[in-house]
């Protein structure tokens, strides 16, 4: 199979690694990719759907795997489906309407309500009914959760302890367009107290395959303090996602989501990421993402022992039920190495050393570039993900941290407490 993968981060590095491993993969291109992904496929730079489409025809691409959410929300699947010369290419990712599950919080909450999927109680407000929003806040207990409706680069969720701050935030989002058009509508919802985890499936719209679950560490500081980031590390499997809990996740969340998609005629073939809260053993959906997680993918795909490309090939004929997934029983741990200052301002262009000294670990590039001297330099906030497999969480983490001792760049920062809460 000839494959094009879109994206350039740690998540796409993890996807690239398993795609490259498959015996079914023939030509494999990545756009734009990064220096670390060159070992897996040919990196090319393709801007815009027209260029992507043209490249696919010229290179006989059969499957396009879309890493990030933005092209899906922008309608890349619809673009392929509506063009006669592209419509036979399988796009791994939902169409524009179904991508609203991530692209609009209001759409996803309505979908969950219609399909009886457990989620926090909520209401949606706009500039016309700010006062009603303030009244709704009074019916909730603190802390207050306000969510910009649209994509806001992971920053659109604000959690506040006082009702005065929550009212001010509501005005800021709606009246002052704090998140631009993303906060033209705001979802206010009940705060759910529990432990978060991430559950993933790959679906053909009818059948689904359950991938390993993971726990992500979102805050920048140790002990889950400080600003939210894209994710500082991950662990898979998650000990509290036991059989009883996962059974509830399947029945109340995954099955109802897949059935809801079918019933409502939403065209979905691709990964679904369920961001869940475990509230006293009951799963609630915090959010849907229409892509894999990052840095969850780094741990999840490290544990995938079956062939992902075989799964992609079954999607086209809606035969994903025939896929025999094989999951490595070992524990995977991922630690993100970040630029000092992230998630606020940080410097780029720092030379990274020691990547060649790593042993018994996977080094995924997330935010790197190559300079004129062919050295690997930093080019993002999250720079490198180090993933190791071990007999248990402590063992996997020991390997990660030992390997990280060999890697360095100016102002490198990482959390030293990934997975500590689960041991
Ligand atoms: P989201 O972008 O919807 O994933 O929200 C970002 C983060 O905010 C989540 O990962 C949770 O930690 C937190 N969060 C969102 N909604 C809630 C909620 N209803 N109750 C508690 N925490 C929440
Ligand atoms: N790690 C969370 C995400 O990918 O959205």
Image: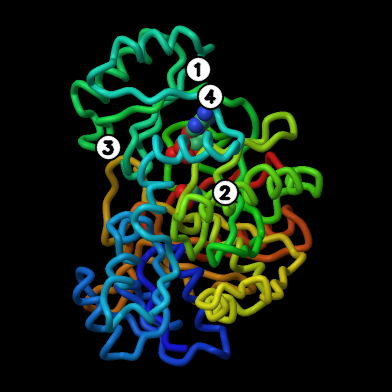
- x, y (%) of residue 37? 41, 76
Going from the N terminus, do you reach mark 2 or mark 3 first?
Answer: 3
228 sits to left or right of 298: left
266 sits to left or right of 246: left
Q: Within 8 Å: ligand 1 and the Cβ of disc 4?
A: no
Label placed on residue 121? 4
Going from the N terminus, do you reach mark 3 or mark 1 first?
Answer: 1
Residue placed under numbered mark 2 in the picture: 257
Label placed on residue 182? 3
Q: How crowded is mark 3: few (under 14 residues within 10 Å), some or many (20 or more)?
A: many
Of marks 3 and 1, the one in the foreground: 3
Going from the N terminus, do you reach mark 4 or mark 2 first?
Answer: 4
Residue placed under numbered mark 1 in the picture: 143
Q: Residues within 10 Å of mark 1 (few under 14, many from 20)?
A: some
Question: Gap between marks 4 and 2, in whole Å?
Answer: 18 Å
| Residue ID at (28%, 57%) | 74
Look at the numbered disc 3 and give the secondary structure of its residue.
helix
Question: Gap between marks 2 and 3, in whole Å?
Answer: 24 Å
Look at the numbered disc 2 and give the secondary structure of its residue.
helix
């Amino acid at each position: 199979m000839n494959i094009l993968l879109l994206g350039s981060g740690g998540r796409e590095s993890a996807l690239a690694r398993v795609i490259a491993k498959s015996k079914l993969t023939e030509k494999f291109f990545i756009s734009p990719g990064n220096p670390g992904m060159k070992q897996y496929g040919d990196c090319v730079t393709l801007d815009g759907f027209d260029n992507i489409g043209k490249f696919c025809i010229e290179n006989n691409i059969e499957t396009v795997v879309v890493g990030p959410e933005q092209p899906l929300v922008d309608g890349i699947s619809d673009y392929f489906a509506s063009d006669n010369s592209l419509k036979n290419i399988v796009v791994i990712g939902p169409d524009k309407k179904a991508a609203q599950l991530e692209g609009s919080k209001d759409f996803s909450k309505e979908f969950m309500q219609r399909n009886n999927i457990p989620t926090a109680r909520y209401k949606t407000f706009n500039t016309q009914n700010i006062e009603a929003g303030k009244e709704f806040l009074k019916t909730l207990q603190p802390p207050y959760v306000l969510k910009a409706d649209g994509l806001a680069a992971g920053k659109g969720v604000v959690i506040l302890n006082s009702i005065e701050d929550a009212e001010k935030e509501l005005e800021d989002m709606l009246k002052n367009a704090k998140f631009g058009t993303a906060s033209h509508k705001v979802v206010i919802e009940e705060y759910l107290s529990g432990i978060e985890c991430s559950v993933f499936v790959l679906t053909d719209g009818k059948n689904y395959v359950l991938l390993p679950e993971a726990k992500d560490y979102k805050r920048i500081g140790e002990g889950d303090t400080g600003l939210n980031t894209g994710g500082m590390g991950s662990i898979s499997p998650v000990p509290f996602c036991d059989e009883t809990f996962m059974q509830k996740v399947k029945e109340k969340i995954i099955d109802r989501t897949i059935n809801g998609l079918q019933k409502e005629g939403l065209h979905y073939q691709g990964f679904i990421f369920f961001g869940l809260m475990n509230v006293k053993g009951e799963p609630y959906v915090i959010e849907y993402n229409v892509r894999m997680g990052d840095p969850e993918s780094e741990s999840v795909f490290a544990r995938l022992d079956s062939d992902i490309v075989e799964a992609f090939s079954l999607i086209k004929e809606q035969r994903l039920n025939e896929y025999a997934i094989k999951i490595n029983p070992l524990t995977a741990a991922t630690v993100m190495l970040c630029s000092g200052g992230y998630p606020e301002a940080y410097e780029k262009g720092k030379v990274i050393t020691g990547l060649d000294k790593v042993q018994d670990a996977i080094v995924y590039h997330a935010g790197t570039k190559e300079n004129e001297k062919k050295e690997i330099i930093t080019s993002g906030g999250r720079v490198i993900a180090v993933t190791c497999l071990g007999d248990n969480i402590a063992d996997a983490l020991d390997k990660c941290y030992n390997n990280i001792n060999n890697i360095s760049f100016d102002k490198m920062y990482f959390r030293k407490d990934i997975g500590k809460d689960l041991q």
